[in-house]
Image: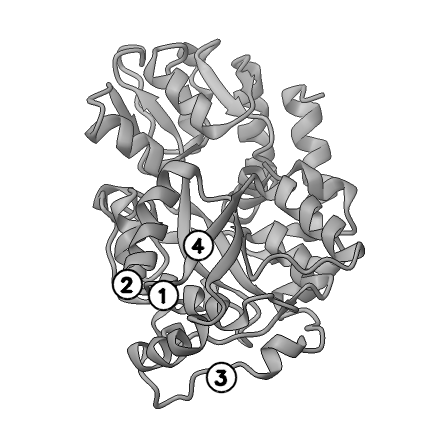
Amino acid sequence: MRRLLTALALGGLLLAACGGTAAAPSPSSKTAPPRPSTTESPDAVMTRLYEAAKAEGKVAIYSSMNTDDAKKVFPVFEAKFAGVKVEHTRASGEVLTTRVVTEKKAGQDLFDVVESNLFEVGYIIDQGYTQKYVVASAADYPAEVKGADGAFIAARLNNDIPGINTAKLPSGVTIKTWKDLCNPALKGKIAVEQGDVVVYSALRKILGDAEAQAVLKCIAANQPSLRSGHTEMANLLAAGEFAVTLSSNGHRLAQLKNEENKPIDWGRTDPIITDVQGMALANKPPHANAGKLLMEWLTSVDGQKAIQSTGRVPANPKVPPKYPDLNNFAKIFYVSLALRADFDKDQAFWNSTLGVK
């Protein structure tokens, strides 16, 4: 999921955590209404932006939100703001990053909003391809899911938790901690998403270097199956191809369990490793008002409820997830840009230990 970053200049990511460098506003953004005041309500801001966005007619968002989720979220926006069409370009964070860099270097300004894994969005911010924008609902969001200066904000989160096929789990085995995956009874019964280096980076922070290394080594000793793609891995887990995963997207596990009646559960780890999906406004948005409007709506209560309907975890803690069991059992460990400081070293250990080529 994050392998592209090894080929990019990573040093600027730490600067991105502090907001990065914003390029000069585009001509279109110079005529846009000012950013929200501290006394202006989210509804008032959206009303003001909508009047200006009608003339623009659409908003272009580059996002890793999958198509099924987008079909539940963006039509709600279009129904509320008639005449403003959402043009959703969906791709993985790596592909989106490459696309943005390629377009910008060619002098093309084609998107208004970018939304994906925080590491990829952080890189885009650091290149100067976005601008700061503080949404009216920003005060409702934890510091861990937004840039203090408006560089980014999250509308949704991904919980990275061990997935369990309860029908395939060996008798007497329980998965409550990452160490439980070291149980020899799980040999040949574990799957690992080979790009999940960030899980190891988070474990180093949570457990300490020595213990995190020991856990990954003993998981490797259980001969895990290396997979690519969290959705496919979760589906194979439900099909019984393996008994557990090191880390799966919580919302997909919950969908399989609650909507498809599969024998699925998840490990209640403490803390819950949680990926932040960052969102930022383009430095030269072709539809500046519509771009701001979409960001305002996605972070409003209505937008968060639309995200809730997909099963994803809303970033605003005031809007609970559709499946509360995804994040109500322990404290949250938010993945931050600071974790990227040792990315090269973490990836080298991850690859060599697990045999990732």
Q: CA distance from mark 4 to mark 2?
A: 12 Å
Is residue 159 shown left or right of residue 194? left
Q: Earlier in the sequence, mark 4 or mark 2?
A: 2
Q: CB atoms at circles 2 and 1 under 8 Å apart?
A: yes
* Residue under the point 62% across and 50% down: 120
* Image location (x, y in percent) of residue 159: 40, 43
* Residue under the point 49% across and 66% down: 291
**Mark 2 Cα within 10 Å, few/some/many (few <14, many 20+)?**
few
Residue at the spot of label 2: 80
Q: Earlier in the sequence, mark 3 or mark 1?
A: 3
Q: Amino acid at mark 2?
A: Lys
Comparing 115 with 327, the one in front is 115
Residue at the spot of label 1: 297
Is residue 78 shown left or right of residue 92? left
Residue at the spot of label 4: 86
Q: Earlier in the sequence, mark 3 or mark 2?
A: 3
Judging from the image, what secondary structure is the residue with disc 2 in? helix
* Image location (x, y in percent) of residue 153: 48, 64
